[in-house]
Image (cartoon, rainbow, N blue to C red):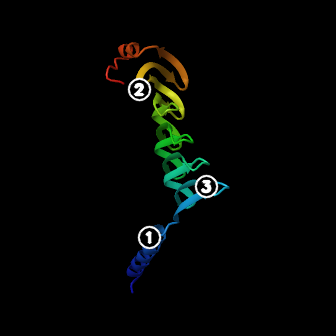
Amino acid sequence: MNMKLLKFVYAILISFVLLAFISSEDKRYERTYFEDGTLASEGWMRFNIKTEYWSFYHPNGKIAEKGYFEYGKKEKYWFFYDENRIRTKEGKYLKNEQIGWWVFYDKKGRINHKCQINKGVKDGYCLKYKDSKMISAEKYSNGAKIKEWSTFNAFTHENNLSNLK
């Protein structure tokens, strides 16, 4: 065999070995439990790092939070619940940091307020609700309140946001 052909065959063999290794990666479904045996969490692990969809539970067995991981960090949309399975909040993560609009609920599961979050702090509008109707608004810059409107009408008039509910 000439040297070029030998190198080519060697490269092909190495490629097959690498493909076999990558395709047989250490991916497994894992469950953890509280001391009493109740399920605490479940989801996918890859190379001992949380990945894909995960669920976490309260000690009473009811869902506490659920969402998606990439490389061990919270990503995409997450949901959070109290011990009675009433949703408390929901929103998006990017590399383990809260971003975008987050929705917060009262103890009866009704929307209490919605806030724009950037890197885990209020940064933008925060809209407050009562009986599913917006009643007031605030504006934040990097966690500090910079403006407040006591009525929905004042907020929409000043901000020209007539279609925001």
Image spot of residue 121 (x, y percent):
54, 30
Q: Earlier in the sequence, mark 1 or mark 2?
A: 1
Front one among 99 and 133: 133
Task: Point out which mark residue 108 bears.
Answer: none
Image spot of residue 83 (x, y percent):
57, 42
Estimate the spatial distance between the alpha carbons at disc 3 and disc 1, rounded to whole Å.
39 Å
Task: Point out which mark residue 19 bears.
Answer: 1
Image spot of residue 113 (x, y percent):
47, 27
Q: Residue at x 37, y 17 (%)?
A: 156
Q: Residue at x 57, y 59 (%)?
A: 31
Q: Which residue is mark 2?
A: 132
Q: Amino acid at mark 1?
A: Leu
* SS for dot 2: loop
Image spot of residue 22 (x, y percent):
47, 67
Vertical placement of 102 versus 58: above or below?
above
Asked if marks 1 and 2 touch (Cβ < 8 Å), the reply is no
